[in-house]
Amino acid sequence: MNARGRARGGWQQSDLPDAGDAAAWFAGRLPAGWFTGAPEVTCDRDEIVVVGELPVLEAEHPDTDAGRADAAAAEAGRIARFREETRDRRIEIARQAENRYQRKVAWGARLGGTSELFTTVSVPVMTRLRQPERIVLDTLVDAGVARSRSDALSWSVRLVGQHADEWLAELREAMSRVDDLRAQGPAGP
């Protein structure tokens, strides 16, 4: 361990504070009126992402092509305004959360059909791949789907995530149950 209480190589998963209450903490900490309801809060080992729904804008002619384009522009503008107007408060709240949970905090907003994340963390992940997996990545690069093997791997992970949401949710639920059982420990005589 170093002077800051970290194992060599950075925070280990077991060193991280539990972020299971992060959604409730943010819901209680955010100013009233920022979002139309409780924000969506997702956590992993590196980052907490907070995304809230902004109040709906009234479009003048939403059923025409021009009206839809105007609505999309208005939504993007409203999200940009929210980002600028709340920057100082978001930074303050993020610092408190980062201290509490030992993870970076990223923000985002949704409005109508427009969604934007602000300053998210891009974390390098080391992996070893055998030739068949490298060939898959190289094919994606050669076909112009991705700019590099790294982009191809990221694209593949996003695609799996989109098509395996239900399975991943079941897996997370099962892991949570294992954690609960592990915390209970064996019943003594």
Image: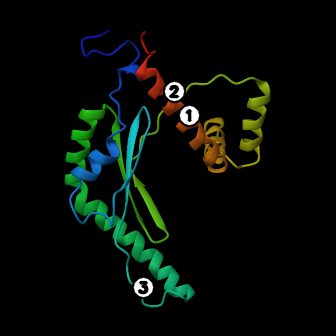
Report crowding for label 2: few under 14, some 14 to 19, many 20 or more residues within 10 A (C-alpha).
few
Which dot, 2 or 3, sits closer to the camera?
2
User: Does 87 sit above or below residue 81?
Assistant: above
Residue 43 placed where, x, y %? 42, 40
Where is the C terminus found, in terms of image quarters?
top left
Residue 23 placed where, x, y %? 34, 47
Q: Residue at x 25, y 16 (%)?
A: 4
Q: Residue at x 27, y 61 (%)?
A: 84
Query: Where is residue 120, by image quadrant?
Result: top left
Query: Mark 2: which amino acid?
Result: Val
* Discs 2, 1 touching: Cβ within 8 Å: yes
Where is the N terminus found, in terms of image quarters?
top left
Counting residues from the N terminus, which is met first, the one under dot 3 or under dot 1?
3
Residue under numbered circle 2: 178
Residue 47 visible in the displayed image: yes
Residue under numbered circle 3: 59
Query: Mark 3: which amino acid?
Result: Ala
Query: Mark 1: which amino acid?
Result: Ala
Q: Residue 174: which disc? A: 1
**Cα distance, mark 2 to mark 3?**
49 Å
Which dot, 3 or 1, sits closer to the camera?
1
**Cα distance, mark 3 to mark 1?**
44 Å
Residue 122 placed where, x, y %? 46, 39
Query: Where is residue 117, by image quadrant?
Result: bottom left
Q: Residue at x 42, y 90 (%)?
A: 60
Helix or strand or loop: what does disc 3 sit on?
Answer: loop
Query: Where is residue 157, by image quadrant?
Result: top right
